[in-house]
Amino acid sequence: MFGLVLIFVIPAVLANPLAPRIECPKFTPVEDFDIPQYLGRWYDIEHSKWNFGGEELLCTSPKYGLINATTVSVENFSLLDSALGLFPVKATGTASVTDIPGSLLVDFPYGDSPSPLTPDGYGNYNVLKTDYVTYSCIYDCQPTEDQVYDGVIAWVVSRTPQLADAARQECEDVFFSLGVDMSNFIHTYQGPDCTYPED
């Protein structure tokens, strides 16, 4: 799910040295995932906290396009809310298909080294539930080796800037079943001050 400040779709979660050691829960991405249906623009509704997804980023809108049968383009757009006003920021990268349907590996050509697949073969962008036309529930769980944070990312995106409560609940129910702490979710501003790139 953009001067130039860079943001990331799948960034590092805020470190918490007091976070307990965890084991990632078992989860299953959408088994019949249809990439062509998933392409296009989405809008960030809410997400867990991470270093490059803070409350100062407004109007966040990821867009996905087909490069070839195994690679998808990723473009994340946001408005940065600063003391000098709103500034557009963008990050571009790619997402590669994995052997697991509904699980993609997102990579940006800057910052840290690309995330590897998990030992079970999962990428860092797992679509756990979507109807392609309304909402999508995205999840990742990759704790660091030193366990300084739980490595969980949960993200709700919508085809429109606003999402009905019932559709949002579809994702929140999925996240709740995986033990995601939603008490600190960031609800992204998608209001009249937003402007978006032309598609």
Image: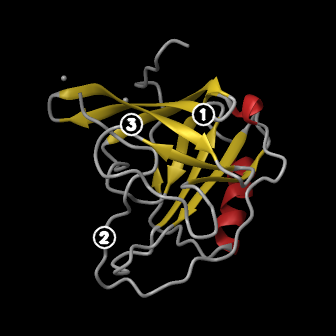
x 53%, y 41%: residue: 44
Left or right side of 59 for 131:
right
Extreme residue toward the right, this view: 32
x 30%, y 70%: residue: 15
Work out whether mark 3 precedes mark 2 in sequence or the reverse, and give the earlier one: 2
Q: Name the residue under label 1.
A: 71
Question: Any mark on residue 53, and which?
Answer: none
Q: Is mark 1 on a helix, strand or loop?
A: strand
Please indicate, yes or no, whether residue 197 appears anywhere in the rendered image.
Answer: yes
Work out whether mark 1 precedes mark 2 in sequence or the reverse, and give the earlier one: 2
In this picture, is 32 found above or below 182? above
Mark 3 in CB contact with mark 2 (< 8 angstroms): no
Q: Nearer the viewer, residue 198 or 81?
A: 198
Q: Name the residue under label 2.
A: 15
In this picture, is 109 found above or below 194? below
Could you say where residue 163 lies in the image, as x and y percent from the top left? 65, 40
CA gap between label 1 and label 2 equals 30 Å
Tell which tag, 3 or 1, sits nearer the viewer: 1
Q: Name the residue under label 3.
A: 58
Could you say where residue 172 lies in the image, as x and y percent from the top left? 66, 61
Q: Which amino acid does label 1 sit on?
A: Thr
